[in-house]
Image: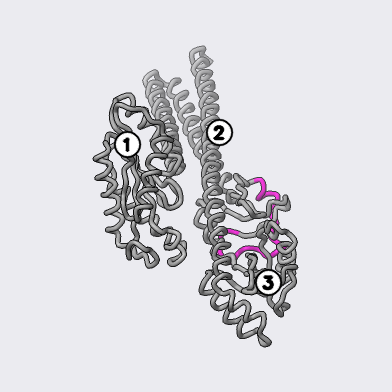
Amino acid sequence: MPTNIKQHLLIVLLLLGGVTTLVYLSARDHLEDFDEYHQALADSATRHASDVVELYLSNLHHSVDLFARQHISAIRALLDAADKQQLRDELEQSLSYFLSGAGALTVADAAGRPLLPDSALIGRACLQNLRLFALDKSRASARLRMHRDAQGNHFDVLTEVNLPDGTPRIMLVTVRPDVLASYIASAQPEHHRLYLMLDDGSHTIELSAQPGQGPAEGHGVMSARERQRVLRQQHIENTRWHVVDVLEAGVRGSEARQVMLEGVVVLVLLIVAGVVTSYKIVMTEKKRHLASEQLRKNERELERTVQQRTQALKKANARLEQLSLSDGLTGIANRRHFDAVLNREIGRANRENKPLSLLLFDIDFFKNYNDSMGHLAGDDCLRKIARAVDAEFKRGGDLTARYGGEEFAIILPGSNSAEASKQAERVREIVHGLNIPHPNSSVSERVTVSVGGSTLRGDQYKSANELIDEADEALYQAKSGGRNHYRIYAS
């Protein structure tokens, strides 16, 4: 075989080996990117699900306490009645109207002994929860646990009740997990499965993300293969649960097969190109040149594919970063985003000797609104106000953020005290113009806000905490002055 052909064949073999290595490394990097992306999704999903469940459970305990206080006379009448069934049915019907997902209720003495004929309604796990609640004076026992009895799959909410004569009693309410499961489902990413699991190391699944599919007590132990696909778990405060994110079976394998198939296709094409190139080299110099052009084209296509995948990963990372700076309920900037922007803008104002104003506004009598309209309506009210105000403040550098609870903040770079006053009145008018009914407000028939503001002049220095404290003081003055007003801090 001529020396030049041997050299060309050696070059072709070395090239194929190099491209094989390149395809392998590209496939490995792609799978690493895949793992990082789904890990980030799992982190976000479990944090969101944990926050939503904690808020739901807090509202649930509040609602049960409120129901007990409002129906204390009915509870006393039920305990004193000879025929308890009719009064109990009426009380449970009122409970079902008051609290979505509520099932049966029972009342026990201070030692946890039931005072109603509960043999057909309250099971062994419920009775154990009553005893634990009675024994623990801090009321921290009987932490949430899913179980099954005549009421079906449920968990218990307990509260202490003092009868009109001061006698202490314990009320237990069973709650179906459908609403809880729907909240978990809303946070579940595609190709992931979210579960509520016990935190005792038993790998017991308490509830899946699909309503009505939570296993009964003692069932639903996660398999060893599923445990290998766990991406993230997040503990839920004041419960025995944590949220676990599991990647669906076969998702990573399918991705790996797809990457492998693409690599094989590329390799086959390159091998064919190499064979054709070798043949054409033997035939003529011209054909060798054409084969080399084909090889370069294939390399460009491979490079373009790598660039496209890199760009897609950057977009996904940017999206995850944006989600981390947004408030989960309202969609506007969250407290973390607000703190970063305020410090940055204060630094810029000090460097350029320009003014900067900060507005804090709070929904008037928002607790009364939640008590009368319900927490879901309260969440909707927060979203409407956040979106309406955010839509109005779009000037370069302006930022509207949820500061906490029903309180919001607006950063106004370049605005002096007079402009801050105009913008504070503008915020009040925007919210007032939404015409959101507020049947339990003492200042208006619709939802209103109180606004406080502070200003950093171009010739002075203030820290972020000082600016916030001043705005908070002005907000307090606006509330003390009758609410539905604004005040600007006078330094």
Q: Is residue 178 above or below residue 480?
A: below
The reply to whether dot 2 and dot 1 touch (C-beta < 8 Å) is: no
Residue 324 percent location from the top left of the image = 46, 42
Report the number of discs: 3
Q: Is residue 222 magenta?
A: yes
In-image side of 195 versus 416 (left or right)? right
- The quadrant in which residue 161 appears is bottom right
Please tell me which of labels 2 and 3 falls first in the chain: 2
Q: Cβ–Cβ below 8 Å for labels 1 and 3?
A: no
First along the sequence among labels 1 and 3 = 3
Residue that badge 3 annotates: 167
Q: Label 3 near label 2: C-beta < 8 Å?
A: no
Q: Earlier in the sequence, mark 2 or mark 1?
A: 2
Residue labelled with disc 2 = 28
Tell me the crowding category of disc 3: few under 14, some 14 to 19, or many 20 or more residues within 10 angstroms, Cα based: few
Q: Which mark is residue 310?
A: none
* Residue depicted at x 54% and y 59%: 56
Q: Secondary structure at mark 2?
A: helix
Residue type at mark 3 is Thr
Q: Which mark is residue 455?
A: 1
Q: Is residue 386 visible?
A: no
Label 1 sits on what residue type? Answer: Thr
Q: Where does the magenta region start and end?
A: 208-228
In this rendering, would 132 be left or right of 20? right
Seen from this angle, which residue lies furthest top? 3
* Dot in front, 2 or 1: 1
How far, Cα to Cα, is label 1 from label 3?
A: 55 Å
Q: Give the structural element (helix, strand or loop) at label 1.
A: strand
